[in-house]
Amino acid sequence: MAAATLRLLHDSRLRWLFAGALLASFAGGLVHGALAARLGGMDAIELQTAAVSRGAATPLAVVLLVLIAVAGRYRDGSWLHEALAEPRPTRRLLVSAAPVLAACGAIALSCGAAAAAGSGAAGRIEPGLALVAVGLHLVVSGIWALWMLGVAHATRSTMLTLAIGAGLPVVVEPAIAGLLAQGDLGALRWLLPGQALRAIAELPATGGVLLQPVPPAVLPAALGTIVACTAAIGMAAWLRERGPQPR
């Protein structure tokens, strides 16, 4: 099963996806580096955090990879062969997830490095701080990849996976966070999944020049949201795999 998933990851579409994510990440880091040069007075850690957290194209790249490598297999029926070969849902999920999560990790690491390099090309870069920003980005991206993997298995739909993975962080959560801020309930936004991940990724940035500082006091709420979402999505995927397999 793992070998079949690895063969699928050699799809030419994924190679183009990887190349596009790297170019977009470098461009994102370049933009943030240029902004830092214009604004001035920005701490190096805030610049590196902004470039990697906001500049890297990892979230969308992970969604598209899971869309092709997982959700698409339900659509074309190829997942049925693996379901018949391995009837145990837990083992089936774990074995098939390992190559996909490894590929997502490679994307996160490469995109984070590309974004840091882009910011360095436009402004300044401190390797030690860049490593901190990329390390946090890798952790957050791993959690995001795990969520998207669970969503793909739970929904078994390419359209729903894309709608949740792209629509939630880009459209839905910013709108909810804005409404909460207008109603003096801004602290509740850290209970949103995407905002909770952002709290982890951008915690070191305290300067407030380009990024709004994340109060350390919200960290327990953010971690609680991440644990709850991980458990809920994992349970949904496991329960769906225990049910009848698609024919």
Image (cartoon, helix red, strand yellow):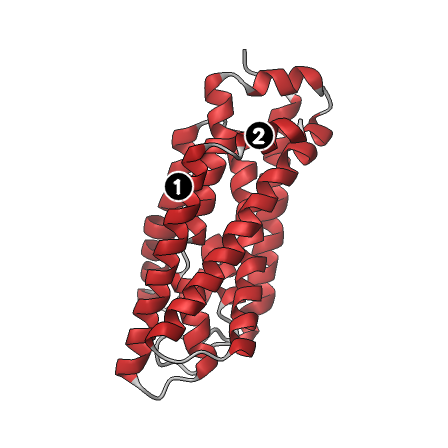
Return the x and y of residue 120 as percentages of the image width and height.
40, 74
Q: Tag count in the figure?
A: 2
Amino acid type, residue under disc 1 in the picture: Trp
Residue appearing at x 59%, y 59% in the figure: 139
Amino acid type, residue under disc 2 in the picture: Arg
Nearer-N-terminus badge (1/2)? 2
Q: Quarter of the image containing the N terminus?
A: top right
Residue identified by numbered label 2: 7
Residue identified by numbered label 1: 16
Tell me the element at label 1: helix
Residue appearing at x 38%, y 67% in the figure: 118
Return the x and y of residue 162 as percentages of the image width and height.
40, 37
Q: Quarter of the image containing the C terminus?
A: top right
Q: Quadrant of residue 102?
A: top right
Residue appearing at x 59%, y 44% in the figure: 101
Residue appearing at x 47%, y 39% in the figure: 65
Circle number at residue 214: none
